[in-house]
Image (cartoon, grey):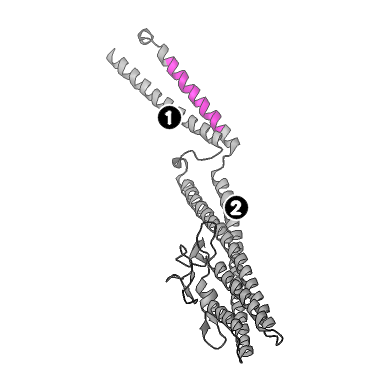
């Protein structure tokens, strides 16, 4: 009697273990069918699971790079528009200088031109102190939380921060792009054509003073002002060209990232998508095994001691 109870208990334990194992296999297969994935847990295929995890990390990183590029592209587009406005102001200054150089201009006319030059100078400073949608200054460099240029009480213009470096944004692995340009290069380090630099805002201020109080060498000084404005325009065009180049490079980078994303999705699909025909075959096999195990339990439960006597 004791031996019978022990052997029966062992049989029940074995069948119970088998039942749990078969039920677990069946549930995992159902999960894969419901999710459309071949792997419901890493243990199903450790090597493939590791590859899928790597692909997922790459996709997350590439998505972040694309987001960075989108934000940077919007910022550079705003800068490009701002530089266009800057160039338009300088172009108007150039026209006024040529107008003032006309020998028929009387002092009253020159004063009127001086008033417009003053307004244009203020406009240039305002453009250089432009802010983005986030309230940060476009041309502030690393210190984009304060206005880049400031006018002193004596009328001269100075850089308002001590850190005009250019920020960088990562647009792809190991690839960074300049995110902004600075007031220093746009206003305070204009090439004078002779190996030196000058402050464009102060040059416009000198032009204003000249028009208010012309002298014997007015034409010569107007010619110098014209050269200064032309150099300023060249600098604006150069920076604007660089901005366009960055946008073009980002477009190429983004196209490459989009292709990588597409390839990663296809590869992940090939590795992880479910073969439904094979899954249904496996499901039927597991259901058959589960049913056989259940019948074994029923048959064993129906036995009595008298069946063994």
Q: Secondary structure at mark 2?
A: helix
Is residue 121 a member of the stretch shown in magenta?
Answer: no
**How many C-alpha atoms fall within 10 Å of the one at disc 1: few (<14), some, or many (≥20)?**
few
How many numbered marks are there?
2
Q: CA distance from mark 1 to mark 2?
A: 38 Å
- Please say whether residue 250 is visible from this viewpoint: no
Percent coordinates x, y for residue 117 in the rendering: 61, 75
**How many C-alpha atoms fall within 10 Å of the one at disc 2: few (<14), some, or many (≥20)?**
few
- Residue at the farthest top position: 306
Residue beneath the point at 54% across and 55% down: 67
In the rendered image, which quarter contains the C terminus? Answer: top left
In the rendered image, which quarter contains the N terminus? Answer: top left
**Circle number at residue 21:** 1
Vertical comparison of 145 with 119: above or below: above
**Circle number at residue 262:** 2
- Please say whether residue 198 is visible from this viewpoint: yes
Q: Which residues are magenta?
A: 281-299
Residue beneath the point at 48% across and 25% down: 290
């Amino acid at each position: 009697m004791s031996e019978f109870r022990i052997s029966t208990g062992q049989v029940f334990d074995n069948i119970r273990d088998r039942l749990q194992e078969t039920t677990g296999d069946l549930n995992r297969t159902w999960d894969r069918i419901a999710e459309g994935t071949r792997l419901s847990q890493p243990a199903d295929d450790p090597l493939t699971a590791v590859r899928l995890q790597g692909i997922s990390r790459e996709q997350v990183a590439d998505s972040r790079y694309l987001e960075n590029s989108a934000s940077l592209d919007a910022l550079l587009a705003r800068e490009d528009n701002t530089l266009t406005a800057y160039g338009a102001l300088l172009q108007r200054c150039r026209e006024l200088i040529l107008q003032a150089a006309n020998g028929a201009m009387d002092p009253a006319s020159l004063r009127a031109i001086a008033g417009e030059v003053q307004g244009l100078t203020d406009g240039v400073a305002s453009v250089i102190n432009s802010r983005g949608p986030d309230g940060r200054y476009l041309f502030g460099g690393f210190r984009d939380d304060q206005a880049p240029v400031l006018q002193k009480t004596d009328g001269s213009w100075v850089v308002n921060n001590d850190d005009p470096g250019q920020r960088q944004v990562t647009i792809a692995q190991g690839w960074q792009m300049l995110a902004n340009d600075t007031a220093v290069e746009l206003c305070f380090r204009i090439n004078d054509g002779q190996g030196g630099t000058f402050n464009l805002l102060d040059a416009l201020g000198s032009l204003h003073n000249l028009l208010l109080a012309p002298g014997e060498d007015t034409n010569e000084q107007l010619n110098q002002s014209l050269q200064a404005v032309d150099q300023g325009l060249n600098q604006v065009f150069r920076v604007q060209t660089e901005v366009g180049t960055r946008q073009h490079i980002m477009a190429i980078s983004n196209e490459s990232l989009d292709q990588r994303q597409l390839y990663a999705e296809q590869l992940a699909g090939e590795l992880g998508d479910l073969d439904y025909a094979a899954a249904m075959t496996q499901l039927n096999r597991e259901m058959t095994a589960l049913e056989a195990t259940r019948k074994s339990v029923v048959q064993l439960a129906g036995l009595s001691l008298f069946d063994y006597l």
